[in-house]
């Protein structure tokens, strides 16, 4: 009996020694398989999460595009509004400046008739009669000349300049041609005669000079 018990224990121990390496060798495979199954499960979870998030992400992307388009539109309108405001400001400023410069235009036109009358009056006085022997005519003539000089000074002060273009090239913006005639010694296209002087107010023609223009014979 003792010998039989000893044989059974020896067989059990030898069996355990034979089986243990197999188990040890197979355990890494079991671990890898478990890890792979775990990773596959995690991947499946991630994929499901991504599939669940994709509609939300798509909605956010569409909203982003809409907001960018709205921002672009608002920016464009803002720039246009700024440009329109600046143009309006410049036009208003120009109108104010023009009003300051040319606000007296109507008044100046009325005074031009007075200046024309003074000029005609001084030209009509015979110069040979203006002597000390005729003091009344001399004083009257001197008064007319002084008045004409003074009114021209006032005109110049306010930007009103006389145009007497005799001998100059004809300019349709400053001159009005009453007739064309051949004039000896005058180049064609030049002003040969001035019948009425013109005036400019701050560089703008207020009244064109009435002239006769020389032409080729």
Image: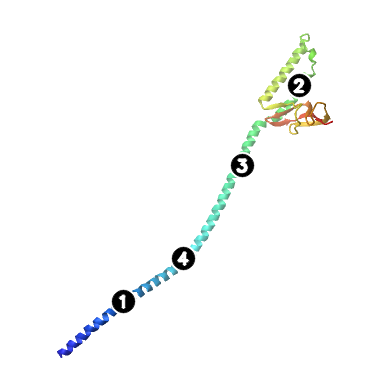
Q: Which residue is mark 2?
A: 119
Q: CA distance from mark 2 to mark 3?
A: 45 Å
> Depth-wise, is mark 2 or mark 1 nearer the camera?
1
Q: CA distance from mark 4 to mark 2?
A: 96 Å
Where residue 51 sits: x, y (%)?
47, 68
Residue sitting farthest toward the top: 133
Q: Name the residue located 73 percent from the left edge and 17 percent from the top edge.
A: 145
User: Considering only order in the chain, which callout, 4 or 1, is on the residue closer to the N terminus?
Assistant: 1
Q: CA distance from mark 1 to mark 3?
A: 86 Å
Q: Which residue is mark 3?
A: 87
Where residue 161 sits: x, y (%)?
70, 26
Q: Which residue is mark 1?
A: 27
User: Considering only order in the chain, which callout, 1 or 2, is on the residue closer to the N terminus?
Assistant: 1
Q: Quadrant of the N terminus?
A: bottom left
Residue sitting farthest toward the left: 2
Q: Which residue is mark 4?
A: 53
Q: Is residue 126 above or below residue 72?
A: above
> Depth-wise, is mark 1 or mark 3 nearer the camera?
1
Where residue 204 sits: x, y (%)?
70, 32
User: Considering only order in the chain, which callout, 3 or 2, is on the residue closer to the N terminus?
Assistant: 3
Query: Considering the numbered disc 1 on the image, is that residue within a helix, a strand or a loop?
Result: helix
Query: Considering the numbered disc 2 on the image, is that residue within a helix, a strand or a loop?
Result: helix
Q: Residues within 10 Å of mark 2 (few under 14, many from 20)?
A: some
């Amino acid at each position: 009996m003792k010998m039989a018990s000893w044989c059974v224990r020896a067989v059990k121990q030898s069996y355990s020694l034979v089986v243990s390496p197999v188990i040890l060798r197979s355990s890494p495979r079991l671990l890898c398989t478990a890890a792979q199954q775990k990773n596959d499960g995690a991947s499946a979870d991630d994929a499901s999460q991504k599939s669940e998030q994709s509609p939300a992400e798509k909605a956010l992307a569409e909203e982003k595009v809409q907001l960018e388009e709205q921002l672009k539109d608002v920016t464009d309108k803002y720039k246009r509004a700024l440009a329109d405001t600046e143009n309006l400001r410049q036009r208003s400023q120009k109108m104010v400046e023009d009003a300051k410069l040319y606000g007296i235009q109507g008044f100046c036109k009325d005074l031009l008739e007075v200046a024309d009358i003074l000029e005609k009056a001084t030209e009509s006085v015979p110069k040979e009669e203006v002597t000390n022997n005729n003091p009344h005519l001399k004083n009257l003539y001197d008064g007319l000349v002084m008045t004409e000089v003074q009114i021209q000074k006032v005109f110049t002060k306010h930007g009103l300049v006389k145009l007497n273009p005799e001998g100059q090239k004809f300019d349709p913006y400053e001159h009005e041609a009453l007739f064309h005639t051949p004039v000896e010694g005058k180049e064609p296209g030049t002003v040969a005669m001035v019948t009425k002087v013109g005036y400019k107010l701050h560089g703008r023609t207020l009244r064109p000079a009435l002239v006769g223009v020389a032409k080729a014979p």
